[in-house]
Image (cartoon, rainbow, N blue to C red):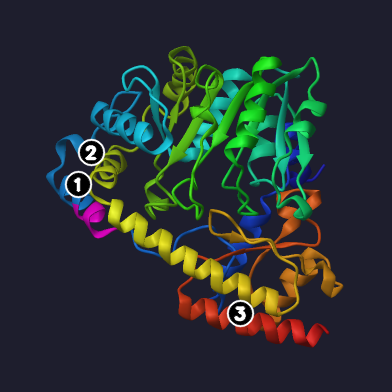
Amino acid sequence: MSSSSSDKKRIAKLVREMPRSGIRDFFDIISTRHDIISLSIGEPEFETPESIRKVAATALQAGAQATRYTSNMGLLELRRALAHYVKKMFNAEYDPEKEILITTGVSEAMDLAMRAIVDPGDEVIYHEPAFVSYRPEILFAGGVPVPIVTTEEDGFRLKPELVEAAITKKTKALLLNFPNNPTGAMLSRQDFEKLAKICIKHDLMVITDEIYAELSYGDEYVSIASIPGMKERTIFLHGFSKAWAMTGFRMGYSCAPAALTEAMMKIHQYVMMSAPTISQIAAIEALSHAEIDTEQMRKGYQERRDFMYDSIREMGIPCTKPGGAFYMFPRVGVLGLSSMDFAMNFLNEESVAVVPGTAFGACGEGYVRCAYVASMQNLKLAMMRMKRFVDKLR
């Protein structure tokens, strides 16, 4: 037996059979080239606001607190600031001492939530196209992923009646992500009220990932955690990577009833101990003084969204206008190429990176995800190159 074969056998079967992230594959390609305009990675091109960077730098220079562990739950000052922010932004009240946990990014918070509530064989309903980590995280927790396909015809909204039809005796939870990655879809208050009735009727838990909440472009933002009867069965996840352009700080948090927060903290204390202290200090500053910066970024993304949407539609490519986040999900299958072929050929011929829709589930075939996080200058150049590429295909 070769060394390679022997090594593979030593790896757990679940991990061995888990595919690499389709997003990460493209990240690895573009990281070796400097001539590429990337519309592939969901990382803001905006700088972290200056006040946040200054506070972090000053705290690090001072040493002491910034270089030491915090409590497993996180800095109480930050949790108090978050309790105030979540009440104001999401209309949901949480006790900062018992119901808010600071995590290393929303990715850790999602992992903790899954492992805290899912027993082997429990089914977790989620909607596709979906962020690449959801299905693996359900599997890593021992659960059974139950995807519900959302469609372009419905604006990629999750239809409550499809959720109810998917429920079985083994269903434990419903996982939501709105504003959605990769489609930018949103749900209305009426949608959430219908979903809430279903979850209460069938005694389901809800995990809601609302990392893109501040980047919504409609008149009203609604969290399912604010719907009557839902707080006690909801794990609300949020963080600082997107709206505050703080991806490298790895700063997330969860809000949930005390018993659920304690369960998540049990796992967190053994695998992570505490989130980075310097990032927690930066997060306090973000909540205190960066509201204007966040709103300016939101307006910048909305301008980019409108430009990209109009450009893609002018090319004759069907596309749903996103209600939030910073992603477009055009249906490039009308050009006669698979998602992967479109993405690879576009990258090789025009040096622009997008992500094949299949990275977000099989129903993403025929689509690509385009992140409008680049500067307007680069975005205009990318759209010019896309038009040239599309014209050649025709």
- Whichever of callouts 1 and 3 sits on the residue coming sooner in the sequence is 1
Residue 41's place in the image compared with 10, above or below, is: below
Q: Element under label 3?
A: helix
In the foreground, 332 or 223: 223
Q: Give the residue type that dot 3 points to.
A: Met
Residue 245 in the image: above or below residue 139: below
Mark 2 and mark 1 residues within 8 Å of each other at the beta carbon: yes
Please check the rendered image and state whether residue 34 is part of the magenta-colored stretch, yes or no.
no
Q: Quadrant of residue 254?
A: top left
Query: Label 2 vs label 3: CA separation?
Result: 44 Å
Main SS of residues in magenta: helix
Instruction: State yes or no: residue 52 in magenta.
Output: yes
Mark 1 touching mark 3, by CB under 8 A?
no
Magenta segment boundaries in residue numbering: 49-54
Q: Position of residue 295 (x, y in %)?
A: 36, 57
User: Amino acid type of disc 2?
Assistant: Thr
Write the residue at 39% across / 64% down.
Answer: 46
Position in image of residue 337 (x %, y %): 84, 71
Q: Which residue is mark 2?
A: 67
Instruction: State the residue lying farthest toward the right.
Output: 336
Residue 123 falls in which quadrant of the image?
Answer: top right
**Closer to us: mark 2 or mark 3?**
3
Outermost residue to the left:
62
